[in-house]
Amino acid sequence: MKLGIGVGYSGRDLRIPIERIQLAEQLGYDSVWSAEAYGSDAWSPLAYIAAKTSHIRLGTAVQQLAGRPPVMAAMQAATIDALAGGDRVIIGVGVSGPQIVEGWYGQPWGRPYHRVKDYVTIIRKTLAREVVEHDGREIALPFTGEGALGIGKPLKSILHMNPNIPIWLGTGTETMVRLTGEIADGWLPLRYTPEHVARAKRWLAEGAEKAGKTLDDIEMQSSVPVVITDDVGAAIDAAKPNVALYVGGMGHRSLNFHKQMMVQRGFGEAAERIQQLYLAHRKDEAVAAVPDEFVDEAALYGPKERIRMRYRDWVDAGFSGLTVGTEQEEAVRFMAELAGLNRRA
């Protein structure tokens, strides 16, 4: 089992836990992952981390598709990869939701399936230093739509980029997971737990087969919060506000992928209740409505022996990697021990 360390995106202030990242690298962790919402961006922290580390892989989990054109995603990834010595960057892409796509970036929601497919195709062409031309259903280069002068020139990268930079997709619905298997090198599952990943793995395998691949050709890395504690209930309670935020407020009432995932995991009644309360500005009640079981099955909380036993569920479910979310140095070290990493610290 490969391990990653998650740094997420900023809150009010931006702080990169560089000592924790350096420790993870010394312990044999494979990757470090940044993210973005509508504050700090996903790529800039990786440039900083690259300068402070030597070999750990640098991934976005995820960069928002609407946040940059596909050629810019390739340019940012290739630039950091070159500065970091090569073969270190992973481009992790997700579509986010329509509230952010249309409200923050000022882009139409469009057809995410075709937009993702176009996006990945253009990134690969850019990294390969092809002359970038693409006549897609959602994205076309050169642009010839309304307002165009009609003189756009097909170009290829000046920088000799690493053509092998992998592209991973953060997806959760059946259609998008199948597309991930078909066009991506890795999968960042949206809140899938060991109890619920088997069906999604079938979708992933079906997509891979369409492209002449197998499931073994695709890395599958989930994220899991880890807290070593004797008070499991307190750890669960501390996580509930974030669950309520995403299920209740990170999406429109009629389209919220986090709520949909909660429904798929068998907590439909609670998901509806949380959303109703959150949107009614009764946030404390929304937090209280989050079931303990929903939080606990997606986390590794408790004494070391409890974490050790539950960690086996993630291994047995077939994930190739886990991104550890923790503020505890002890947890960083203990997860390295569980995964049998080559310790250097």
Image (cartoon, grey):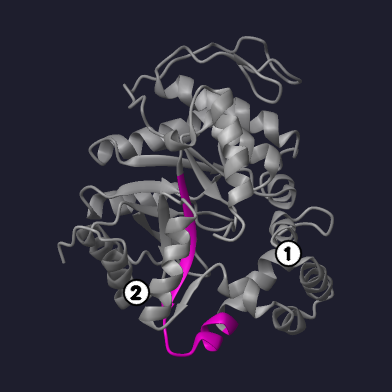
Q: Is residue 236 magenta?
A: yes
- Quadrant location of the N terminus in the rendered image: bottom left
**Pointer 2 local density, CA inside 10 Å: few below 14, some 14–19, many at least 20:** many
Q: CA distance from mark 1 to mark 2?
A: 29 Å
Residue 189, x across and y down, in percent: 56, 50
For the residue pair 176 and 50, the one nearer the viewer reads as 176
Q: Residue furthest left?
A: 344
Instruction: Identify the disc placed on residue 109.
Output: none
Question: In this rendering, is residue 109 above or below 130?
Answer: below
Magenta-highlighted residues: 220-237
For the residue pair 72 and 224, the one nearer the viewer reads as 224
Number of numbered callouts drawn: 2
Relative horizontal placement of residue 37, taking residue 248 as reference (left or right): left
Residue 185, x across and y down, in percent: 46, 34
- Quadrant location of the C terminus in the rendered image: bottom left
Element type at mark 2: helix
Residue 81, x across and y down, in percent: 31, 37
For the residue pair 255 and 210, the one nearer the viewer reads as 210
Question: In this rendering, is residue 247 above or below 163?
Answer: below
